[in-house]
Image: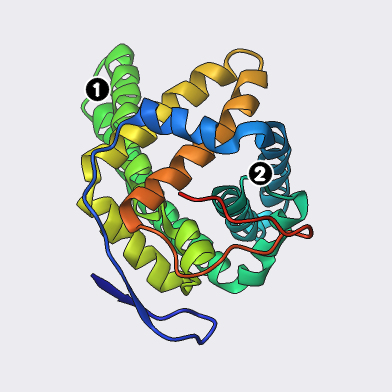
Amino acid sequence: MSQFVPSDGTAPGTIEVRRVDVHTFELLRRGFDLMGDQYWLMVLIVLVGVIVGSAVPLNLLLGPMLVGIFLCFAQLERWRKTEFGALFRGFDHFLDSFIVTLILMAAALAITAILITLIVGAIFVSIAAELPEEVIFLSVIASVLVALPFLMLVYLPFVFAYQLVADRRLGGVQAVRLSLEGVRANLWGVLLFVVACGVISLLATMMCYLPALLFMPIQFAASFLLYRDIFGASEYDPPALSVPQLPVAS
């Protein structure tokens, strides 16, 4: 159990971080089933959220948009229905989500700077040693390939951070800390999930982007369900629908 203090000033609580068996393709299937007849609406919500979140410098709006997307999935879980307007309820958590983004950017920049320094240093050493150009080229390619997994590891601790802001109303720093705890408890499963989704997204992008756009809401839904498997049900209700719905029994 981990203690948490909601950023909205409500009473502190506890979150159980579970160890679970992560089955990527089962999660993707469950994610698609979760959306049901709301799939095409979720395609629109995710597309708008990603575009708006990426449109402003410094990813200023990325956090609120990601939080909004996960709030839509919380509505789907609760009522099997969501609304486009719920996407913008992520701005209710603007500061906390932006803090998560700032920590993520700082970590990524620090690791990138270290890796670039090492790669450039390796190039200068190779040139000073008067190695053949082919060897230098291959060493650069090898260095980049080695660097990519390190960059991916930077993002792993943040896999659940935005969901914790959306679902548990946590502050940015606390959300990152608990996200790291959840990833650490399920490291290999989460890692394989992220890698598998990344490979599928890459292959889908190579097919004229449309398949990638259609896959994005399924990936978000699977991530939401993985979060729920690890952290359990929330004590808070998602944003209310404009037309109230009866709760769906889980």
Residue carrying label 2: 50
Q: Position of residue 125 (x, y in %)?
A: 24, 34
Residue at the image point whose x is 35% and y is 22% from the top: 141
Decide: few, some or many residues near mark 2? Use Cα within 10 Å; few <14, some 14-19, many ≥20: some
**C-alpha separation, residue under disc 2 versus residue under disc 1:** 47 Å
Residue carrying label 1: 130
| Image quarter in which the N terminus is found | bottom left
175 over 140 or under it: above or below: below
Q: Nearer the viewer, residue 155 or 88?
A: 88
Kindly tell me whether residue 209 is visible in this rendering. Answer: no
Q: Position of residue 163 (x, y in %)?
A: 48, 57
The amino acid sitting under disc 1 is Glu
The amino acid sitting under disc 2 is Val
Q: Secondary structure at mark 1?
A: loop
Decide: few, some or many residues near mark 1? Use Cα within 10 Å; few <14, some 14-19, many ≥20: few
**Quarter of the image where one finds residue 51:** top right
Q: Nearer the viewer, residue 244 or 97?
A: 244
**Quarter of the image where one finds residue 44:** top right
Residue at the image point whose x is 63% and y is 26% from the top: 214
